[in-house]
Image (spheres, rainbow, N blue to C red):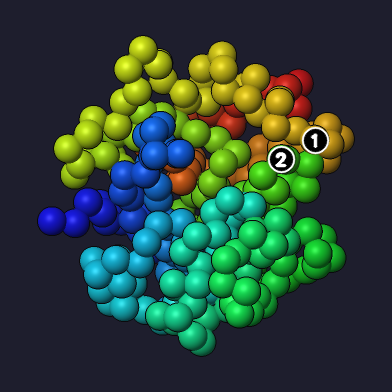
């Protein structure tokens, strides 16, 4: 039985959630997110395997137009998606492109190499903010139509209950509490990951200015309540 949980979290926004343990030890969960754009094409942050169930759902929803790598370490499945959807454009941070094992994979855009104001063609549906000062070179995304912010490693909301809901594991780490945006540790984590404090302030404020009501993380449960407060709590080192 598949361990992937497929859910429409908002109109035209689907998540594909499944178990994933960092270093094979720490359950953080994995999640891909697909947005159906007004054109009918799909934009997908590809961060989980393209298993049978995921591909069937994507094929049902519409043509995949954009395959997105969200940061330096979320690149493992980009080649798999591109092989399944050869007409799609693949866009990722420069740091991810440098780490991709499939050196034949062609990219159509690179945050960190392209000019900061580069448009990739999906901006009418999905806005983006590249965190050049963050250690993992993450990109935050905003889908105004559903008021959803989508991101990979900028914000965690652990334990990953939904992502482990079809697993034999609980997804919890013994003796470790929650690692969510309101935890004391998260703001320390965000502060420690900032390599360029001024850039972090700029980009954290950009995200805070977005009118989102939901945060869809790659790791942990979707935040449907107090999403703006969650961002401000996690990034208070750069917002206060």
Does the CB distance between marks 1 and 2 fall below 8 Å? yes
Q: Position of residue 85 (x, y in %)?
A: 44, 81
Q: Residue at x 46, y 56 (%)?
A: 47
On screen, residue 105 above or below 178: below
Disc 1 is placed on an element classified as loop
In the image, taking residue 172 as reference, residue 86 lies left or right, namely right
Residue 196, located in which quarter of the rendered image?
A: top right
Residue 109, x across and y down, in percent = 70, 72
Check disc 2 and report the residue beneath it. Answer: 135
The CA distance from mark 1 to mark 2 is 6 Å
Q: Position of residue 226 (x, y in %)?
A: 47, 29
Q: Nearer the viewer, residue 24 or 47?
A: 24
Compare residues 123 and 5 and report the one nearer the observer. Answer: 5
| 116 vs 194, nearest the viewer | 194
Q: Position of residue 202 (x, y in %)?
A: 80, 40
Q: Residue at x 78, y 48 (%)?
A: 132
The residue labelled by disc 1 is 195
On screen, residue 21 above or below 57: above
- Left-right relation of 192 to 218: right
Is residue 229 visible in the rendered image? The answer is no
Give the mark nearer the N terminus: 1 vs 2. Answer: 2
Residue at 57 percent of width and 17 percent of height: 185
């Amino acid at each position: 039985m598949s361990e992937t949980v497929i859910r429409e979290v908002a109109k035209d926004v689907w998540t594909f959630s499944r178990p994933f343990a960092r270093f094979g030890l720490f359950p953080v969960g994995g999640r891909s997110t697909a947005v159906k754009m007004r054109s009918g094409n799909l934009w997908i942050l590809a961060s989980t395997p393209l298993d049978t169930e995921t591909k069937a759902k994507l094929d049902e929803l519409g043509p995949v137009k954009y395959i997105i790598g969200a940061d330096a370490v979320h690149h493992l499945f980009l080649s798999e998606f591109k092989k399944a959807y050869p007409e799609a454009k693949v866009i990722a941070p420069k740091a991810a492109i440098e780490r991709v094992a499939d050196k034949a994979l062609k990219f159509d855009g690179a945050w960190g190499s392209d000019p900061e104001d580069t448009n990739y063609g999906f901006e009418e549906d999905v806005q983006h903010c590249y965190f050049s000062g963050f250690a993992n070179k993450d990109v935050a995304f905003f889908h105004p139509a559903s008021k959803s912010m989508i991101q990979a490693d900028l914000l965690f909301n652990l334990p990953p209950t939904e992502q482990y809901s079809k697993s034999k594991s609980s997804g919890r780490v013994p003796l470790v509490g929650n690692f969510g945006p309101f935890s004391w540790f998260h703001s320390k984590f965000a502060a420690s990951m900032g390599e360029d404090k001024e850039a972090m302030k700029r980009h954290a404020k950009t995200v805070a200015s977005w009118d989102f009501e939901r945060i869809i993380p790659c790791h942990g449960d979707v935040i449907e309540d107090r999403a703006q407060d969650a961002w401000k709590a996690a990034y208070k080192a750069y917002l206060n």
